[in-house]
Amino acid sequence: MKVVGFCGYSGSGKTTLVEQLIVRMKYEGLRISVVKHAHHKFDIDHEGKDSWRHRQAGAFEVVVASDRRLAKIREYEAVCEPTVHQLIAELVECDWVLVEGFKHADIGKIEVWRADTGQRVQYVEDPFVFAIATDSPDRLPQSTLRPVLNLNDPDAVVEHLLQNASRYEYTAT
């Protein structure tokens, strides 16, 4: 299984890029999973639904399944930020895991950076950033030997991933 993270600040285009990569990689016949970091009290369940009622009653985990999908909701008894490695371990075997939002994770990452956001880059200080996807390569604040990919060309990003697949081979830590 290969794992690649996509790091960058809000508004840089991570979600759009990941969405485009899923479509293209699936077209290549690959099974793709996603691990997405969310902030604080997000919810996929809705008040009044059976699974919501079970959680409100105190269930630690609720698994909801149909003939089309499965969802697992786990309530932490205390504030607990799971690591990217713990979340990857929850997944069924697949070809690629695209990780969005774990900026400081110790996995190979592609930094998504847009100069117009005014945010600083991460690649200068993060040895786990293996490539940069940007719409303004001429405005990168520091030169790099890392591959610089066109953020607006998701096919080029897929090509980079497939040509460098061994670099993204996942070994559980």
Image (cartoon, helix red, strand yellow):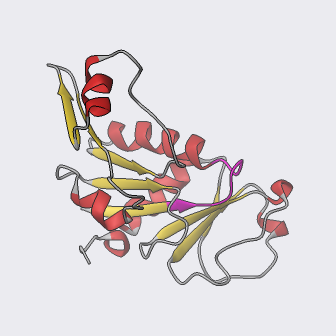
Image quadrant where one finds the C terminus: bottom left
Is residue 17 highlighted in magenta?
no
The residue lying toward the viewer, choosing from 127 and 49, is 49
User: In screen coordinates, is 107 left or right of 153?
Assistant: left
Seen at 66% across and 74% down, the residue is 122
Q: Magenta stretch: dominant SS?
A: loop
Q: What stretch is highlighted in magenta?
A: 6-13
Seen at 21% across and 35% down, the residue is 62
Expressed as whole percent of the image width and height from the top left, the position of residue 153 reads: 61, 48
The residue lying toward the viewer, choosing from 25 and 170, is 170
On screen, residue 151 above or below 106: above
Dividing the picture into quarters, in which one does residue 167 lie? bottom left
Seen at 59% across and 72% down, the residue is 147
Seen at 28% across and 70% down, the residue is 170
Figure disc tally: 0
Dividing the picture into quarters, in which one does residue 124 lie? bottom right
Q: Which residue lies furthest to the front in this view?
A: 57
Dividing the picture into quarters, in which one does residue 134 lie? bottom right
Expressed as whole percent of the image width and height from the top left, the position of residue 110 reads: 54, 65
On screen, residue 20 above or below 82: above
The residue lying toward the viewer, choosing from 145 and 79, is 79
Image quadrant where one finds the N terminus: bottom left
Q: Residue furthest top?
A: 48
Is residue 10 highlighted in magenta?
yes
User: In screen coordinates, is 32 left or right of 11?
Assistant: left
Expressed as whole percent of the image width and height from the top left, the position of residue 33 reads: 32, 46
